[in-house]
Each structure stands twice: as structure tokens, then as C-alpha cells.
Amino acid sequence: DWSSCTSSHCCASPGWKCYEKNSGYAQCRDQCSPGVHDEEPAHYRTPWSCRELGGASPSPSPAPPPSDGAGHSCHGAGSADWSSCTSSHCCASPGWKCYEKNSGYAQCRDQCSPGVHDEEPAHYRTPWSCRELGGASPSPSPAPPPSDGAGHSCHGAGSADWSSCTS
């Protein structure tokens, strides 16, 4: 992020806060230590107060647990990307699905085209049915809109330059 929040007191990146350097400048940062910051160019090397202005943007909601697509939780047993889901019918990664190759094998994939897959080793090169077993894990919830930490949402054009905060 590292963008100026002098006027808005808002930060677009989840968990980042608007920290004051002095009465004329504030910046979105993931942390701040009061005093001079040696990483700054020499002509900007003046002390930071590190007073928080506004607050942190909320952290995004965690992804829901894997599901078999029929509303049943996989209870943490979702299969990894590109691995067998023949028994579980569940994929751990959001948006990935358990696709059947044949009655004896299914795999977690992000997509599947019925037929022979030329990328497979020759001795495994048999047709895929690509029938979905169970279904996809749910996609994670989107991150909430940026906030100044005082119940105001931030609005503006750009991911790091929020031009105003409103209640």
C-alpha cells in the first residue's frame, strides 16, 4: 500500500493503518515505529509520530470450509489441487471441483474437458468423463470495503487512493 492517507485517513489494504508522520503527512503502512526511519531518502528523514489516524481496514473473512457442493462440509478433508478425490468428492481449494475420469478415478481440477488429455503419461491416457462429483468448494467471501476504523467506509477511484470516507 504505502500510499498517502493525509486527507482520507483510509487505507485500502486489509489490516493496514493510516499513520501520521507529522501535521503535514500520513501514510498507509502495515506497522510504524516512532522516530526517524532510516529507509527514507535523506531529505525526508524527519521523525514519525506514528499516531494512528482513523484505523485499520478490516481483514477479509476467512474462506469457508471445503464442501462437496451439495451443502455438506468436508470437515477439513478436502483433497489438494490435482490429487485424487475419488473417495472424498471434495476439493480443498475454493472454486476447484472433483472431476471423474472413470469409475475408478477422480481428481481435483480447476477445469476439465471430456476426452483424452494429451498431457497425461501414455499409460494413463484414457478418456475423461469430466462428470462433477460432489461439486466445488465455495469461493471465499469478498473482503469488506476499506474503512477508517470509526465506522466510515472509504470511497474513491483506485485500490490505494481512497478519496473520501463517509458514514
Image: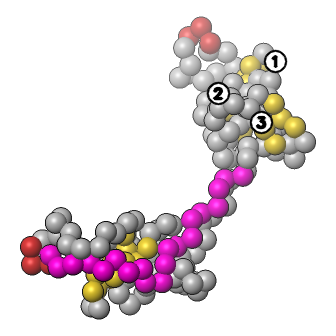
Residue at the spot 31% in from the left edge and 69% down from the top edge? 113
**Pick the front one: 124 or 77:** 124
Horizontal and vertical percent position of residue 34: 70, 29
Horizontal and vertical percent position of residue 133: 43, 84
Label 1 sits on a secondary structure element that is loop
Q: Is residue 50 visible?
A: no
Amino acid type, residue under disc 2 in the picture: Ser
| Residue picked out by circle 3 | 155
Q: Which residues are magenta?
A: 125-144
Q: Main secondary structure of the magenta part?
A: loop
CA gap between label 2 and label 1 equals 16 Å
Viewport quadrant of the C terminus = top right
Position of 88 with respect to 41 (left or right) is: left
Residue at the spot 77% in from the left edge and 23% down from the top edge? 6
For label 1, the crowd category at 10 Å Cα-Cα, with few meaning under 14, some 14 to 19 and many 20 or more, is few
Amino acid type, residue under disc 1 in the picture: Ser
Q: Quadrant of residue 161?
A: top right
